[in-house]
Image: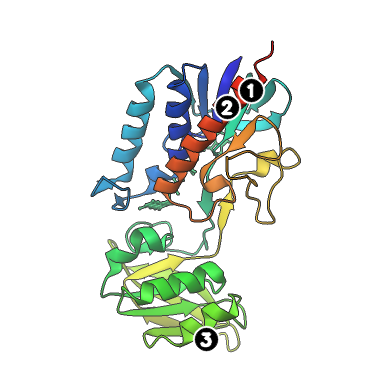
Amino acid sequence: VFDVLIVGGGPAGAASAIYAARKGIKTGVLAERFGGQVLDTLAIENFVSIKETDGPKFAVALEQHVKEYEVDIMNTQRAVKLVPGKVAEVHTATGAVLKAKTVILSTGARWREINVPGEKEYRNHGVAYCPHCDGPLFKGKRVSVIGGGNSGVEAAIDLAGIVQHVTLIEFGTELRADAVLQRKLHSLPNVKVILSAQTTEIHGDGKKVNGLSYKDRNTNELHRVDLEGVFVQIGLVPNTEWLKGTVALSKHGEIEIDPRGQTSVPGVFAAGDVTTVPYKQIVIAVGEGAKAALSAFDHLIRSDDE
Ligand code: FAD
């Protein structure tokens, strides 16, 4: 029986593992892909104290740091079910059942993709998902933002201050962002909004993005925009499908946590992109992971009655 079983091996899970193991308690990490989203990232320039690194290097560093401690790492294993209880159970896709006194859920999230030709080919070569991360790479260039909800409009406002020009493309007949964001957006001289537009393809020269095509949904005409970057902002999907019905989730499917990382189920904590914590960033996931581990330890010392 683990004292702490962490499900998810991204930055949040790695931080939880280090903080838990440093308390001398029996700690395990179950991960489908140790490293998490960081493995899909090229440059990382905003992890405080590391001026510049890249995703794969950062993932190796995470794993090496965790391996400095006595942590049972179970990689390439997917959790499919959580059964809460005084001793909780985590069931894996291969049929194994792991038992733990406390569980930390850190299964992260994934960006929703638009699934058009060019998106996969040019991911990290002009196709981006995180304006906080990749915005500065497009300084002085032309970009588009796909999606006119809050995240798309926030991204367009954010990018307008860095890049030369932003074309915001919305599928529907109007933007869905809050009125205050829309007012701000419309006040910016270097932003153009195109409504009723369905992105059909992202173009490139074989190495980098150089344009985007969309269909005007009123006339069915195809148009091309020349640009260097495309930010896809049509939603972040938390990896919580396997948790429905066990812990309370927000309407977006994120695990609801209190300021200590406690979920609706006693002894079950959560951290990082999978939770309701605002702003999905590595430095934030790491802090949240540390916090959840300290909360799990606190829970253990208070309930150690056997
Ligand atoms: P994740 O990194 O998503 O890790 C989740 C972990 O859970 C993985 O190990 C996954 O395999 C595992 N998992 C999922 N489901 C299951 C399951 N059912 N069973 C077992 N394991 C499971 N942030 C920055 O701060 N700076 C950047 O420059 C930056 N660039 C980015 C670029 C890209 C392309 C992307 C996609 C993201 C970027 N981010 C960046 C965001 C950052 O990667 C995330 O905020 C961070 O990785 C969140 O960490 P996490 O541990 O919460 O989740």
User: Going 38% across and 42% down the picture, which residue do you hit?
Assistant: 39
User: Residue 141 appears at what percent x and percent y?
Assistant: 28, 74
Gap between marks 1 and 3 measured at Cα: 65 Å
Q: Secondary structure at mark 1?
A: helix
Residue at image position (47%, 82%) is 185
113 lies above or below 144: above
Q: Nearer the viewer, residue 165 or 158?
A: 158
Numbered-mark total: 3
> Furthest residue to the top?
306
SS assignment at label 2: helix
**Occupied quadrant, residue 61:** top left
Whichever of labels 1 and 3 marks the residue nearer the N terminus, that label is: 3
Instruction: Specify few, some or many for label 3: CA neighbours under 10 Å numbering under 14, 14-19, or 20 or more.
Output: few
Residue 122 in sight in this render? no
- Of residue 262 and residue 234, the one placed in the foreground of this image is 262
Q: Can residue 47 be seen?
A: yes
Residue type, numbered disc 2: Asp
How much space separates mark 2 and mark 1, taking CA atoms? 6 Å
Which one is earlier in the sequence, the residue at label 3 or at label 2? Answer: 3
Judging depth in this view, the residue of 109 and 300 nearest the camera is: 300
Give the camera-side residue of 254 and 295: 295
Please name the residue shown 49% across and 29% down the image. Answer: 76
Q: Measuring 69% from the left and 24% from the top, which residue is drawn there? A: 88
Query: For the residue labelled by badge 3, is the local secondary structure a helix, a strand or a loop?
Result: loop
Residue linked to disc 2: 298
The residue beneath circle 1 is 302
Q: Position of residue 197 (x, y in %)?
A: 54, 80
Mark 3 against mark 2, which lies toward the viewer? 2
Q: Are discs 2 and 1 less than 8 Å apart at CB?
A: yes
Q: CA distance from mark 3 to mark 2?
A: 61 Å
Q: Which residue is mark 3?
A: 221
Kind of residue sitting beneath label 3: Glu
